[in-house]
Image (cartoon, rainbow, N blue to C red):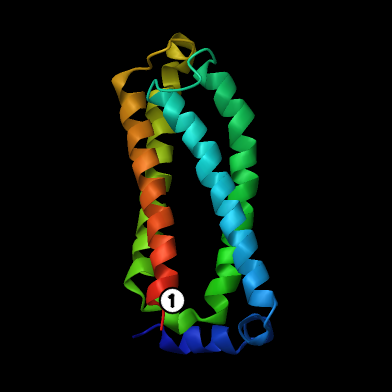
Amino acid sequence: MWLDPGLKWLEATALATEIRENEILFPWVESVHVLAIALVVGSISILDLRLLGLASLDRPVGKLTRDVLPCTWVAFAFAAVTGSLLFSAKASGYAGNFFFRGKLILLVMAALNMALFHAFTTRDLDRWSANAHPPMAAKVAGGISLALWIAIVAFGRWIGFTLH
């Protein structure tokens, strides 16, 4: 693979070596990663379920978004940093893993879904935000988001069982 030299270099860095070889460090980084992902998925699910018209119907979508997304972004930052640290420790193994590559693709799809939602569906958010049943475009975005994040978690779990 054309990435092999870069992956080998990354694995050979002092930090990656320490994470990989230290009996305590890898499990701690992984634990923080799992907790951060739980916060990301949990907070996004609150908004997705509201967009689907299944929960928090008494709260306007705009207010819920302002309340939840700061937590989501902080948790996502922790997940990205810890995920990068875990990747560095076993970069060659992760890069060749089907579920790892799939998780990255799903993350890109989730980002695109979010970008499209914010670019188009929230343009008239003030008009529909307080309605118990958002427009179909918002429901579709919420459903896609929820499905993608469930798949991201599933693929993430499978990585650990298939990494060699």
Q: Residue at x 38, y 36 (%)?
A: 116
Task: Look at 62% across and 53% down and name the residue there.
Answer: 77
Up-down relation of residue 113 to residue 108 (above or below): above
Q: Quadrant where the N terminus lies?
A: bottom left
| SS at mark 1 in the image | helix
Nearer the observer, 164 or 124: 164
Q: Is residue 62 left or right of residue 104?
A: right
Q: Residue at x 60, y 32 (%)?
A: 68
Question: Whole-percent x and y of residue 8?
Answer: 50, 89
Residue 65's place in the image compared with 71, above or below, is above
In this view, 34 is above or below 141 = below
Camera-nearest residue between 11 and 57: 57
Q: State how many labels appear.
A: 1
Residue 132, percent across and down?
42, 12
Where does the image place residue 145, in percent across and percent down from the top left? 38, 40
Say whether residue 85 is left or right of residue 158: right
Residue 136 in which image quadrant: top left
Residue 11 in which image quadrant: bottom right
Which image quarter is the C terminus in?
A: bottom left
- The residue under label 1 is 94
Which amino acid is tagged 1?
Tyr
Say if 112 sits above or below 90 in the image. above
- Across and down, in percent, residue 156 comes to 43, 62
Q: Residue at x 55, y 88 (%)?
A: 9
Where is residue 27, by image quadrant?
A: bottom right
Mark 1 neighbour density, 10 Å: few (under 14) some (14–19) many (20 or more): many
